[in-house]
Image: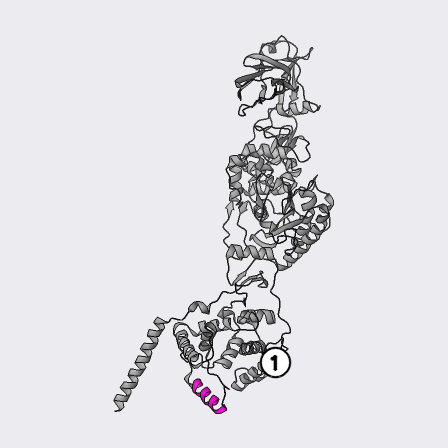
Amino acid sequence: MRKRILFILGGVVFFLIASFFALDLLFPFPEHKLHPPVASVVRDREGKALRIFLPPDGARRMHADFSRISPVLKKTLIASEDRWFKYHPGINPVSILRASIANISAGHVVSGASTIPMQIARMAEPKKRTLWAKTIEAFRALQLKLHHSNDELLEIYLNMLPYGGNIVGVGAASHFYFGHGPDTLSLGESALLTTIPRGPVFYDPLRNPQQARAGRNRVMHQLAKKGVFPPDEIERNLKLPLPDSVRPVPLKAPHFCRMVLERGGRVPETVTTLDSTLQQGAQEIIKNHVARLRGDDIDNAACIIIHIPTREIRALVGSADFFENGFGGAINLADKQRSPGSTLKSFIYGLAFDQGKLVPNSFVYDIPVDYAGYSPQNYDRMYHGQVTVRQALAKSLNIPAVNTLARTGVAEFIELLKKGGISTLDKAAMEYGLPLALGGCEIKLTELTNLYASLADGGKFKPFSVTAGENNISTQILSPESAWLVLEMLSSVTRPEMNETWMLTRDMPEAAWKTGTSFGHRDAWAVGISGDYAIGVWVGNPDGRPRKGISGAVHAGPLLFDLLRLAAPGGKLPAPPEGSGISEVEVCAHSRQLPGPFCSKRTTMRSLSGKTRLHPCEECRQIFVDGKSGYRISGECLGRKGIKTKIIRTIPAKLARWRAENNLEVPQLPPLAPDCDLIPSGIAPKIISPAANTPYLLRKDTPLKFQQIALKSEAGPDSGTLHWFLDGRLVSQGKFDEKLFTEISVGKHRISVSDEIGRVDAVEFEVR
């Protein structure tokens, strides 16, 4: 009989177990309900919450990992809610029996038997409190225990507990009630967070502080009876006050936080690189400057501060006021594409240095040019003739930059910019052309500032980061020597476009900086380097409205210097790169090329060892003159008596032409002796108009006499009268600096020019 009873019982147990597993397969637990969408919390580099992006249901649900929840809270919760949690299978038969007896004796419900898994099941699938609902809860609790570890269940439970209003989970409750994370909860705080979920309204510490205090203290007295915590610790926590307010949802650095969310997606928590102190200071500076700019018809400004060694964004202000209507306040202007103006010139010269074509003290020319119809002008519409690269960059001259880009190559420059992180260049090199030198593209302030950071990092590009530990693989875009030379040029103390009082203040750090103003007077830029920081500033109107007279130097520069003082007080610039990559070389002071035997004045200048290509000076020459007449002698006439040598200094033909056209002194050669027939060596004329690669169009409605073509050439001062021949027919003659024209007809033509001593140049062109 006994065996039969045991057999029957065994069969019943087996049936129940088999039924449970069958039901578990047929009705699996809806796991997705254990993990509802949580808020995305963006924190600064110290872990302080900057912004909380709530989930679609609007709940303040902040996920807390089990390892980051206070052990005090875990002990308090288990001791108060389910002391046998670690041992039972999901339901506690002893508790059920005890609660049943107590409730029957009292005639109403005075005690519950819900375990933590049963409470999780009820929160995941809320139902009316009936016997059938309890049965389902029990089944679900068994499922939870079967498929999850105790730690997993406790983490799920702690993240689902209701704390009143839209506050869900201990992560949110800790933040909004106490202002810190769940990892540092005290015993009193843990007891309150254990109490509130039992009746979120009844135990609301703000609306019902007496009930909340009584409930909290009741939990701590129970803990004392069970010996969970020492009596003195409990007594101390009984005296602690309750929270008297719920902290608002933080909304700091809103543009930056939105950018973090867009880059990383919705994740429970992101610890960023932002320095809150630096961010707050930058916001105040931007706000104050914009208040003044508004009176000048300029609506807004933005800035970014990048830590150069790590490329971490430490501050980003997208506008003066995120909540402001009418001025693009909500737009992240630091991450919008705008024309960069002259700010790219630094990298054109850096590329030219690495290609061996220029060095800081090389001469370049600021005179009118025409590239197949493209004739750039300087901002002030003035020309300066011969200047050094250093002067051209300091004065932000446009024509030398365009000429240098023509020498380095547009495609090569675009490749450098793309390697340097500029992601907005999506056209072919031909579509950008030479206007790229002056900002003929669109760039983001974030990427431009990081490009400048590369100059202070040995010419290495690294992507900027918004979270610690991002991929920081570097790419060499300029040599360390070229990058340092550019920085050194940008640190020149005297800038003609900038009021020096900004730089001479006592607390101004060492800085290398560049300003820029975009096409159409729409954008003003300033980018600077000092110490460990690269700082970029944009000023303008978010709607693209032009403002005549807007200037990077006037409107963005002062803002940059205030930010430099904030971020890098006492900042220094990088030391020259180690090694022999930069050397001093002796050159002719007149041409800045290798000195020849006739270069009497010499100087030294920095060059890139093994890269800079210099040629022998051609501007300092020796000529032979007749001692009596002063005529220049050449060829067979050199055998005459009374011949003397004379050292002369010439200038390039294109510079001579410009100086002559502007009534400036041009070095002249003595005239050639009339009885010396041989053509001497020297510079032959070079035709610059008409251009061989530019087709000319005739208008049918305009007489030909009003559509004459200009005849221009670069010729040396010894060229004398120039004779112009169109298809073999003499059409004009005059000095190299005279303005000459000729009528043309449809078709292909050949034009040639001959100077007074027989040197010739010719080009073919087409008229349509």
The quarter of the picture where residue 401 lies is: top right
In this view, 32 is above or below 728:
below
* Residue 219 coordinates in the image, percent (x, y): 55, 82
**Residue at image x 31%, y 77%?**
18
Q: How is the image coloured?
A: one colour
42 left or right, relative to 89? right
- The residue tagged 1 is 213
Asked if residue 297 can be seen in this view, the reply is yes
Q: Is residue 106 magenta?
A: yes
**Residue at image x 73%, y 43%?**
499
Residue extending farthest top:
675
Asked if residue 532 can be seen in this view, the reply is no
Mark 1 is surrounded, within 10 Å at the Cα level, by few (under 14), some (14 to 19) or many (20 or more) other residues, namely many
Q: Which residues are magenta?
A: 95-113
The amino acid type of the residue labelled 1 equals Arg
* Residue 427 coordinates in the image, percent (x, y): 51, 39
Query: What kind of secondary structure does the magenta stretch mostly adopt?
Result: helix
In this view, 731 is above or below 555:
above
Q: Is residue 421 magenta?
A: no
Comparing 672 with 29, the one in front is 29
**Residue at image x 28%, y 82%?**
11
* Residue 297 coordinates in the image, percent (x, y): 70, 46
The quarter of the picture where residue 321 lies is: bottom right
| SS for callout 1 | helix
In this view, 586 is above or below 318:
above
Comparing 631 with 712, the one in front is 712
**Residue at image x 56%, y 32%?**
406
* Residue 445 coordinates in the image, percent (x, y): 59, 47
Which quadrant does the N terminus fall into?
bottom left
The quarter of the picture where residue 163 lies is: bottom right
510 left or right, relative to 54? right
